Image (cartoon, helix red, strand yellow):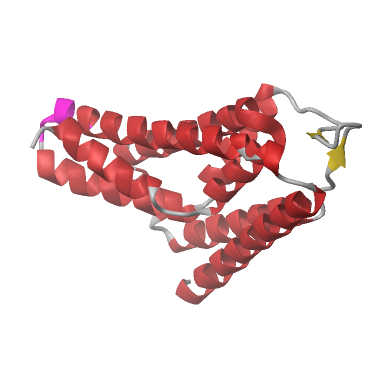
Amino acid sequence: MHPLIQGMILGLTLAALLGPAVFTLLQTSIHRGWRSGLFLASGIILSDFTVLMLAYLGALQLINKKDNYLLAGIIGGIILIMFGVYTFNRKVHFDENNNPVEIRVAGPLTYILKGYFLNIMNPFVWFFWISAMVGVSSNFGEDKHGIVIFFTGTLAVVYATDILKVLVASKLKSYLNRKILLFINRIVGLILVCFGLFLMVRTIIHF
């Protein structure tokens, strides 16, 4: 099977997984529209690319050190909890036509950085991409071109499916009222806090 097809299959598998970045992506798209969601998705895919590049350069040895593993897990958990608390307490504003509006609109760079750091501070992202890099590299051996093609297909599918999620979620905005939007904030906030707590507890237990 061609490396591109293999990579795309891995991308579809990854796209089906639900993590904190995905919930934040959907919540942002619903509240702030497809443009903001697209910038957030761009930050997420940039962080995936960063981790892949570091994995290719040998980050496996760094992340396997216990002290680094503990530090990454705790910091990542704290960041997820902070995002969760902010999202949980986030208010919803409506205009005179009962349409949800944003009082303060952040710039593109804010969403890109949010997506980047929210994703890259999750150690599970590191372990996934490092494991994938190790497995694919051992499969393709010295065929560096095949490795590049494989992960190009993976990242392309992940980004494309994230864009699809953004577009679908943004279409729901006009059908949601204040109570539903607040409920979404509460649910996403709790999910992020739970992810953060789980990450910290799991890290400490495995330390």
Of 59 and 33, nearer the camera is: 33
Tell which residue pokes out farthest to the left in this image: 1
Does 88 sit left or right of 152 as displayed? Answer: right
Residue sitting at x 18%, y 35%: 5
Query: From where the camera sits, is residue 61 visible?
Result: no
Can you give x and y, in whole percent of width and height, for residue 81 in the image?
A: 68, 58
User: 6 or 34, which lies in front?
Assistant: 34
Residue 165 vs 123, above or below: the answer is above
- Residue 12 position in % (x across, y down): 31, 43
Residue 39 seen in the figure: yes
User: Residue 185: x, y in percent?
Assistant: 72, 53
Q: Nearer the viewer, residue 2 or 31?
A: 31
Residue found 27% across the figure and 31% down from its top: 153
Task: Residue at 58%, 40% (x, y): give it.
Answer: 169
Please, which residue is most extreme toward the bottom here?
205
Relative height, residue 202 to residue 70 (above, below):
below
Q: Quadrant of residue 29?
A: top right
Q: Is residue 164 left or right of residue 93?
A: left
55, 32: nearer the viewer: 32
Is residue 102 highlighted in magenta?
A: no
Question: Is 206 drawn above or below residue 9 in the view shown?
Answer: below
Q: Position of 75 compared to 54: left or right?
A: right
Boundaries of the magenta span: 142-147
x 72%, y 23%: residue: 107
- Dominant SS type (magenta): helix
